Amino acid sequence: MRIVSGIQPTGNLHLGNYLGAIRNWVRMQDELAEGSEALFFLADLHAISMPHDPEALRRGTLEMAAALVACGIDPARSVLFNQAQVPQHAELQWLLNGTARMGWLNRMTQWKDKAGKNREGASVALFAYPVLQAADVLLYQTTHVPVGEDQKQHLELARDIAQKFNNDFAPKDENGEEAPVFTLPEPYIPPVAARIMSLRDGTAKMSKSDPSDMSRINLTDDPDEVMKKVKKAKTDPEPLPSEREGLDGRAEALNLVTIYAALADEPVDAVLATHGGQGFGAFKPALGELLVETLRPISSRFAELMQDREALDAILARGAAKARERAVPTLDAAYTALGLVRG
Ligand code: TYM
């Protein structure tokens, strides 16, 4: 198994990132068999596809590294790095740009959402973003990519690019068998919490780019902020149902129950069996407590790690050196397959 995944170092790490992705990164790291490896990275090259402030990106990169370690990513066991220190990502992207089709990228919902009506004014990087994401995973012969639901389409595109590249360019061995250049990666999307929604609107996903901080729980929020955000979360006047079907058409209620279930590591049915019949006046404080208890060790570890900037720099430098080593063979194979002569 080769596990690879990334996160943009913009804004705060929030509960959607944690439950949808990072918690699974940590679990997969902890359960990794002998001979398998996990690589996790800060997608700083992706972050320049939208208008950004260089100083905020610099700070965000270190903060996100600290946040991942605080959540349980162990740099001694996993390879933790930022893309900007591993130039092979950008290099492979260029090679894959010859294979990716304009039509495929035009269908990406993230491109449509983020470019909005102003496509002419969007950056080329925003359009080509999914090709860089394909390079991120294909570079390492990745087998599994733990992500939230919103990244599924990008992963499917990475598979399409890999398949077309293998078909068009993979060298044949002496028996005429194709020796694929790239492995087709499988997404791993968690059964619960694949899509955590905003606390202010049950139809919009929880996101770093939402202008209202009340819409999300940040992993660095203090207990008072967490309790306040949960108490102010949008809900409806009905009590909680005892069965799953009773949440149909109640997006906000479903979201809060899903968060509770994910934090308690229980199925939604079990949460409803215990809390069914309760109003939100009782359920919200229970959820708030559970959140505070989950976040407490993460925020204190984060604060400690942020005291030592040099140690964080060193973690990223060591991770990048390992990632560069792992990246070279596949990048070389891609150059060769394309007929590019490099002496
Ligand atoms: P990003 O930085 O938006 O999010 C990081 C991870 O968090 C998940 N996530 C969520 N899961 C559940 N509910 C939510 N509300 C929620 N919001 C975010 C995302 O699905 C993701 O797994 N393009 C990627 C970064 C990336 C990447 C890659 C990921 C770049 N290259 C290669 C995997 C493999 C992104 O912007 O994620």
Image (spheres, rainbow, N blue to C red):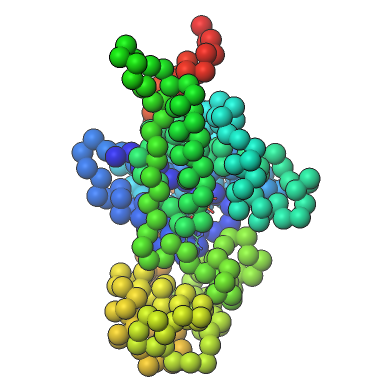
Residue 228 visible in rendering: no
Q: Foreground: 328 or 135? A: 135
Based on the displayed image, in which of its 4 quarters is residue 301 positioned?
A: bottom left
Position of 206 relative to 146 (above/below): below
**205 left or right of 318?**
right
Q: Foreground: 99 or 149? A: 99
Based on the displayed image, in which of its 4 quarters is residue 322 positioned?
A: top left
Q: Residue at x 40, y 81 (%)?
A: 245
Q: Residue at x 45, y 77 (%)?
A: 254
Residue farthest toward the left in the current orientation of the protein:
34
Q: Position of residue 330 (x, y in %)?
A: 42, 25
**190 left or right of 208?**
left
Q: Position of residue 260 (x, y in %)?
A: 38, 75
Q: Residue at x 47, y 45 (%)?
A: 155
Residue 107 visible in rendering: yes
Q: Position of residue 84 (x, y in %)?
A: 55, 35
Q: Position of residue 296 (x, y in %)?
A: 39, 68
Quadrant occupied by the N terminus: top left
Position of 330 relative to 122 (above/below): above
Position of 327 relative to 20 (above/below): above
Residue farthest toward the top in the current orientation of the protein:
343
Q: Residue at x 49, y 24 (%)?
A: 168
**164 left or right of 69?**
right
Q: How many marks?
A: 0
Q: Foreground: 286 or 95? A: 95
